[in-house]
Each structure stands twice: as C-alpha cells, then as structure tokens.
Image (tube, coloured by chain):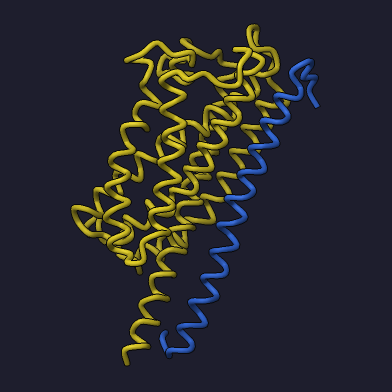
Chain colours: A yellow, B blue
Amino acid sequence: MSIWEYANPLRFMGWTGKVLPWFWALAIAALVVGLGWGFFFTPEAENFGSTVKIIYIHVPSAFIAINAWFMMVVTSIIWLVRRHHVSVLAAKAAAPVGLTMTLIALITGAIWGQPTWTTWWVWDARLTAFLVLCLFYLGYIALWAAIEDPDTAADLTSVLSLVGSVFAFLSRYAALFWATQHQDSSLSVDRAEHVSDVFYQPLLLSMAGFVLLFLALVLMRTRTEIRLRRIRAIETRGRRS
Amino acid sequence: MPDLGEYAVYVLSSYAVTIALLAVIIGGSVIRSRRVKAELARVEDEHGHA
C-alpha cells in the first residue's frame, strides 16, 4: 500500500482514531513525570539559581514552536504539489498549537531573561526572528479565516508558510550568522556541551511530552477539520439536490 | 514544594503562564472537536448519510 493512502480522509480518520488515545496518555505521562522531576527533584544551577527550572518549559516550547512551522511547510508543499487535502488541513490544525508554543517560549523567555540578563527583552537576531515567527503564525491563522474558498485559502497560506520558514530557520540558527544574546543551544548532540545530566534527563522527558502533546493536538484538530469539510460537502450537496 | 529562593516569582509565574496557555489550547481543541463531531452526526442524520 502506498504511504499516500494513509492521507485518504477515511483511512486517516480510522488510524488516527486508534492511535490518538495512546498519544494523549503518553503525552500526559511524559509531561507529568518530566515536569514533576524537573521542578521538584533537580537542584539549582550555579549560574541560574532556581530559574534553571524554567528550562523544562522554555526549551521544549521553543523547539515545538520552530519545528511546528517546519511541519507546516512540509505539509503545505505536499498540498501544493500533490493536492492532498488532509495534508494542508494538518498544517491549518498545527498553526494554533504552534502559536501557543511560541507564546509560551516568548513569555517564559522574557521572565527568565529578567533575573539572568537583567532585561525582559533584547532585539538580537534570534529573539527578533522568533517574534516575527509569532507574527507569521498570527498572519497564517488570520489568512485562513479571511478567505472563504478553502482551496484558495490553502494555496495562499501554503505560500505564506514558505515565506515564514526563513524566520523559523533564523529562530534556530541566527547564532550562526550574528552574535546573539541568546545561547546557541540547550540540547546539543554533544550533551555535555550545554547542560549536565541532572538537568538533561528530565529535560529530554519534558521534550518528549511536548512533542507527544503537539502530535495529539494536531491529530485531533486535523480530524475536526476533516469533519468540518464533510459537513460543508453534505450541506452543499443538499442545497443542490 | 522546593525552595525557589529569591527567584520563586519568576519560576512560578513561568509555570503558571504555561499551564494556562496549554489549558486554553487543549480545552479549546477538545470542546471544538466534540461540537463539530455532534454537528456532523446531526447533518448526516438530516441528509440521510451513513
């Protein structure tokens, strides 16, 4: 069977209905254990004091905020090339989740910045790109809401996602091109590079929890979008007959 | 509750904002999902669809 058949709306509703409860259960378990471990059972860090506990929400939310946009870019390209409706509906479903994660990362970053950098905000390349990414999320959601024809909305929002990918990329890699106040990375392949094991392990679990939560939300919201399309299709057929 | 010292307000407010925003997106998504599912059942019933 071709992988594209999983994107058939009927088949998509079938397999996602089966896996969705597992995603929710695993997401809740990973978040409770990861955040609970990080908040209650990790020590203070030498340079950050107890503010290091913000890492368990700030880093995973920023990771999802950036990668949700890349997921939207991939699914939008699939729409533009192959016209798979479920693909672009998944992008539409992911946008509010990505926006929420962007807001969490921006707010927790500002709160963390005050005691550690003695400022809520700096206009450096990475933070500015991240703020622009947040505005792109808002623009993407507004564009879907503003255009009545769903295929036209899908086309235009797909192009917008391609443009916004520049800022998603810079939100992650701006440090390669400019000097930034923000550190390069908290989760490196070389794990000794940035955070020690005592913080790294609960951080990984929190990351897994945020990833699973994102997947659960996107699958559930995509199912809702598919149902909405079916409602529109039935009502349109009903009016014609 | 761990001793968060002088930074307690920063740590606790970060977690509070995160929980609030997650509650909004999760709650909103679940409520919308249930409403649309019920609406689809009503429309299918009305138009004689399986």
Residue A114 image point, x, y percent: 64, 18
Residue A121 image point, x, y percent: 56, 21
Q: Is residue B7 above or below residue B20?
A: above
Residue B40 image point, x, y percent: 48, 76
Apparent side of residue A43 relative to residue A55 in the rendered image (left or right): right
Which quadrant of the figure has residue A206?
top right
State which quarter of the image contains the C terminus of chain B: bottom left
Relative depth, front residue between A66 and A120 = A120
Q: Who's the residue at 62% across and 55% down the image?
A: B27
Q: Is residue A148 above or below residue A241?
A: above
Relative depth, front residue between B46 and A30 = B46
Which quadrant of the figure has residue B38?
bottom right
Which quadrant of the figure has residue A89?
bottom left
Q: Who's the residue at 57% across and 35% down the image?
A: A104
Apparent side of residue B16 relative to residue A154 in the rendered image (left or right): right
Q: Is residue A65 above or below residue A89?
A: above
